[in-house]
Amino acid sequence: MNAALDAGVCLLLLSAGVVGLVTVDQAPPATPSRADAVADALATTTAQVDYSLTPDVDALNASGAAVADEETFAPDSPELDRTSHGSLAGLLARAATASGGVALDAVEPNATTEPEIHPLTRTRSGFARAVGDAVLARTGAKVRVDATWRPYPDAPVGGQFGVGPDPPAGRVHAASLVIPTGVEPLPPSARTDFDALGSAVADRTVAVLVPAGPARVTLRGDDPTAALVRHRYARLASVTNASLTEPLATEDTRAANERVARRLEARITGDLRAAHDTPMEAVEAVSVDSVRIVVRTWPASEGI
């Protein structure tokens, strides 16, 4: 797969386990007790993650879904090598969205506790470990970093990725930053109509889970990533009860995403309508277009 295509489909593939090497651009270490300094470092420090899709291919082959001819794609084949590069904050955000899942049945509407949502695809966590190692190398041991993507509070869809030990019960400093997911802004009609708002949030939620454009390009290739993308769509179909066989037969990912979005729309609209008095108020609570990263630090004398 060429570099341009790699860049286009990276969001689709980071939910799968990867193994590899992390190279972090050198920079002076941040003061661990200052959360704002660590947050700045995450935003400005860049890292390169080299990894392999071999664990993904192995996992799907073991499940009975053949990914590729072993003679064509041996475990050490360069066809399975990938590289991701960006700021540490950006990598954290991609790890969070890549872990996204849907739990329509497990999450009650308007629940009073934060729901637990499992990733759509369960494979090894090599990429997550690589990103975690890169972050720990920059932040130190007395830091906890959590990246969370949730379309709105208590939504039955979302993803989360954390690095570092849990903070102690004592004094803790906190800072946060927001990383865009890349989806389009909500349309003006969303501010005046709950149905329009729910539809728009559903569309953008699916676009984060599986971007239609890169997915279509991937499905038209003979790379093993095509099987990984099909597996992700199969999981979406299963958890939303959407029928995707017909659109995916012709690589029509926009139609497939549309069907998934319509399955989510009623639930999303109902949640927003129940939690807010007006669409304008609800819009302010919507965060489908961003990943929130929270940094918590504490003095060396606190904790273990």
Image: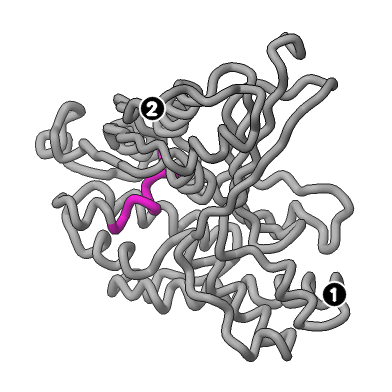
Quadrant of the image for the C terminus?
A: top right
Q: Which amino acid does the dot numbered 2 rest on? A: Ala
From the viewer's side, name the closer residue of 51 and 140: 140
Q: Does the magenta stretch include residue 11?
A: yes
What residue lies at 30% left-to-right and 51% top-to-bottom?
227
Q: From what the image shows, is residue 29 above or below residue 65?
A: above
**Which quadrant holds residue 255?**
bottom left
What residue lies at 30% left-to-right and 42% top-to-bottom?
84
Q: Which amino acid does the dot numbered 1 rest on? A: His
Residue that label 2 marks: 27
Q: Does the magenta stretch include residue 111?
A: no
From the viewer's side, name the closer residue of 11 and 30: 30
Q: From what the image shows, is residue 95 above or below residue 260?
A: above
Find numbered disc 1 in the image and state the secondary structure of the residue it sits on: loop
Residue range corresponding to the magenta coloring? 8-16
What residue lies at 75% left-to-right and 52% top-to-bottom?
106
What residue lies at 62% left-to-right and 81% top-to-bottom?
199
Q: How far apart are marks 2 and 1 (CA)?
A: 45 Å
Q: Can you give x and y, in whole percent of width and height, for residue 185 in the image?
A: 53, 76
Check disc 2: other Cα within 10 Å, few if <14, some if 14-19, many if 20+. Answer: few
Along the horizontal axis of the image, is 40 left or right of 77? right
From the viewer's side, name the closer residue of 134 and 3: 134
